[in-house]
């Protein structure tokens, strides 16, 4: 079964030091087992977080750690197309969540760079339109 895509509004705050970011809109790509593969969190205050295979977690949070299909919730009402998910994922064009850097000496180091920008959902939509991705 191919990956599925969901968009869901959370009307709860984070409950942590970033609680003032407000409620959030989550976009999820999940594998056939229901485990998140990529995820985007768009907060009311404008912060946007992205997690995926190359960047699973950072100081702000991380990729979901449970299968959506293991819960008693029916996610079918939240399903969106892969095209819609990709529009949001690539909305800034140049976003790269993590880079692998190999400094002199051959030791591999993983740098994590997180997108935390004041971009509200409307602004994301405008970026998508301006980039011709709509």
Image (spheres, rainbow, N blue to C red):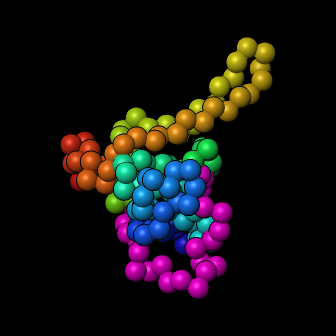
Q: The N terminus is located in which quarter?
A: bottom right
Residue shown at the point (61%, 66%) measured from the top left: 35
Residue shown at the point (47%, 68%) measured from the top left: 12
**Number of numbered discs:** 0
Q: Is residue 25 visible?
A: yes
Q: Quadrant of residue 33?
A: bottom right
Q: Quadrant of residue 79?
A: bottom left
Figure check: 27 above or below 108? below
Q: Nearer the viewer, residue 112 or 93?
A: 112
Figure check: 33 above or below 65? below
Instruction: Answer with left or right where residue 5 lies relative to residue 106.
Output: left
**Residue 23 locus on image (x, y percent):** 42, 62
Instruction: Answer with left or right where residue 84 lies relative to residue 36.
Output: left
Residue shown at the point (48%, 48%) measured from the top left: 49
Q: Which residues are magenta?
A: 61-83
Within the magenta stretch, is there residue 82? yes
Instruction: Answer with left or right where residue 52 lies relative to residue 95.
Output: right
Figure check: 59 above or below 112? below
Within the magenta stretch, is there residue 51? no
**Residue 80 locus on image (x, y percent):** 37, 69
Residue shown at the point (48%, 79%) measured from the top left: 75
Q: Nearer the viewer, residue 52 or 41?
A: 41
**Residue 101 locus on image (x, y percent):** 65, 25
């Amino acid at each position: 079964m191919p990956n599925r895509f969901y968009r869901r509004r959370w009307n709860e705050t984070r409950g942590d030091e970033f609680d003032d970011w407000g409620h959030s809109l989550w976009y999820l790509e999940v594998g056939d087992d229901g485990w998140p593969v990529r995820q985007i969190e768009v907060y009311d205050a404008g912060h946007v977080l992205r997690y995926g295979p190359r960047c699973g977690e950072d100081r702000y949070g991380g990729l979901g750690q449970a299968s959506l299909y293991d819960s008693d919730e029916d996610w079918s009402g939240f399903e969106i197309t892969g095209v819609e998910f990709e529009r949001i994922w690539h909305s800034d064009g140049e976003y790269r969540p993590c880079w692998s850097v190999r400094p002199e000496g051959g030791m591999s180091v993983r740098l994590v760079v997180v997108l935390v920008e004041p971009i509200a959902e409307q602004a994301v939509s405008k970026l998508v339109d301006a980039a011709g991705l709509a």
